[in-house]
Structure formats: C-alpha cells, structure tokens
Amino acid sequence: MTDIQKRILAEVADLHAVPEGAYNIRSDGESAGRRSTAHIEITSKKDVSGIDIRIAPGTKHESVHIPVVLSKTGHQETVYNDFFIGEDSDVLIVAGCGIHNCGGQDSRHDGVHRFYVGKNARVRYVEKHYGEGDGQGRRIMNPGTEVYLEEGSSMEMEMVQIRGVDSTERSTKAELAAGARLLVKERLMTHGSQRADSVYRVSLNGPGSSADVVSRSVARDDSYQRFDACLTGNAPCHGHTECDSIIMDRGRILAVPQLEAKCTDAELIHEAAIGKIAGEQLIKLMTLGLTEAEAEEQIINGFLK
C-alpha cells in the first residue's frame, strides 16, 4: 500500500501494521488483505460487493478489523457487510473509512453493515470516518447500520467523525429483544460548508431491554448538523437519548427528539442542549497563558473526548 493509504489506515483504524486476529482491508474497491481465524471466518459475497463475517458461538476476546480506504478521486462504491455473532461471544469489531481526494471529482463510500447478535453475546463496535486532500472533489460517506440484538445480548457502538468529511448521512436502525442492551456514543465535528445527518431508529421490543444514544458535536464555520433520534418502547423498557452540541461561527444545528411509548411500563427520556462556549471557560484558560484560539481548541478537544 502507498504511504497515503497507510496513513489513512492509522487514522480510521489505529493500524500501523498488520492487525492481530481477523481482518479485511479494502482499498479503492479491491481487497488489500484478508485473514480469517479459527473462530472468525470472512468470506466475499457473491451477489453484491461486500463480505460476510461469521463469529463462532463462545468466541471470547477476539477482534475483527474491516477498514476501507479510498485514494483515487472519483471512486464511488456501495458495500454490504453482514456480521453473524454467535451466542455467548465477546468480540471487538473495528471499522472505518478514510478518503484522500486531491482531484476534481467526488469520492464516495456507502457502507451498509448488518449485525445479527446471538443470545448473551457482547459486541464492541468502533467506526471512524476521516477525510483529507486539497482537491475540489468532495469526500462523501453514507454509513447505514442495522442491529438485531437477541435476548440478553449487548452492543456498544462508538461512532466518530472529527474532520475532513464534506457530507455524511448516517442511518442506524436497531431492534432489541428481552434484556438486550444498546449503547451508542457519537462524536462529531463539522467545519467549512460540511453537512452531517445522523438518524437513529431504535425499537425496544422485549421486556427489560434498554438503549442509550448519546451524541456530542461541534458545528463550526458554515456547517450544518441534524440529529434525529426516535426511541419506540414496545415493552417494559428503558430508553434515553441525549444531544449535547457546541455551535460556533455561522454553524447550524437541528436536534429532533422523538419518543413513542406503546407500553405503560416504557420509560423513555430525551435531553438536548445547544450552546456556545462559555465566556468564563475561555477567560479561565486564557489566564493560564493560552490565546483565545488555543483555549477554544482545548475546550473542544475535551468536550469531544
């Protein structure tokens, strides 16, 4: 791989060498490396572009890395990846997409990930998006995620997009059975004229299921963000969504809360806060010797951790 591709891999998947465990690296529409293990099998789909990842029941403390790199201007693709996580397993899945675009044509990656999580399984999923390049072509990423949690299973999702992506439409759908648990932590920063839409649709179908969807974001310059989260309680359950945003310059932010209870024992909560950086925070840091710009960056970095 080129130095550019290696740098992007480090950004989106923290990879500086071949990872341990199972992996599938995709570069400009082609496979750049793949490895299955005794408990994790990765195979190519035959009808569409993408892969199937099958994790055997009882698999513990193993990982799968499936990063995507685009470095050719004008390259556009749609990829379908399905994960079948066996009962009683405990695994880490690291995905992510990075686009380097120095040309005049738009580069775009649409990724559809479907997770079928077996009973009492635990999954930690990390997805990072990153863009770079000084070309006029845009860097576009549209991730679609579907999560199906069986009884007693859980999934923790870390969704990160800090810089360089001109347009993104993130769509996440989840269905939870009895005792299932979903935790989503989204961290997002937009700048320039970027646009980011995050849409979550979570159905709490089983007794004792719970979901916590939390977004922290910063909108700078002329960028626009939309956070649209809907929780539906179809059984005795607990659901919580939270949008906490900092708005700067001429940025725009729209938070759309939606709660729908179809059971008298469904407990659903939504919180939203949008505001600018507090003046006293800036003053406190500036008294320690930081410039106003440096103080702003310190506050933003701490907010998005």
Image (cartoon, rainbow, N blue to C red):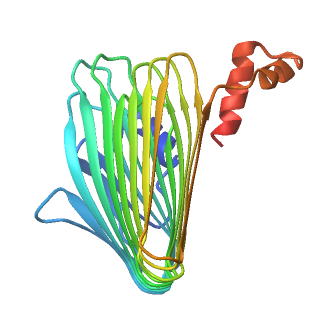
In this orientation, which residue lies closer to the viewer: 10 or 192?
A: 192
Indicate left or right for 32 with 75 as reference: right
In this orientation, which residue lies closer to the viewer: 187 or 259?
A: 259
Whether 258 is drawn above or below 224: the answer is below
Q: Is residue 9 visible?
A: no
Please state the horizontal and vertical placement of residue 240, each as a whole percent of the image: 56, 60
Indicate left or right for 194 with 31 as reference: right
Residue drawn where x is 28% and y is 61% of the image: 81
Quadrant containing the N terminus in the rendered view: top left
| Furthest residue in direction left, as rendered | 47
Among the 4 quarters of the image, the one containing residue 114: bottom left
| Furthest residue in direction top, as rendered | 291
In this orientation, which residue lies closer to the viewer: 297 or 252?
A: 252
Q: Is residue 101 visible?
A: yes
Please state the horizontal and vertical placement of residue 194, each as a whole percent of the image: 40, 26
Among the 4 quarters of the image, the one containing residue 97: top left
Residue drawn where x is 49% and y is 79% of the image: 153
Please state the horizontal and vertical placement of residue 202, each as a whole percent of the image: 41, 63
Whether 232 is drawn above or below 105: the answer is below
Please state the horizontal and vertical placement of residue 266, each as a whole percent of the image: 52, 73
Residue drawn where x is 86% and y is 15% of the image: 289
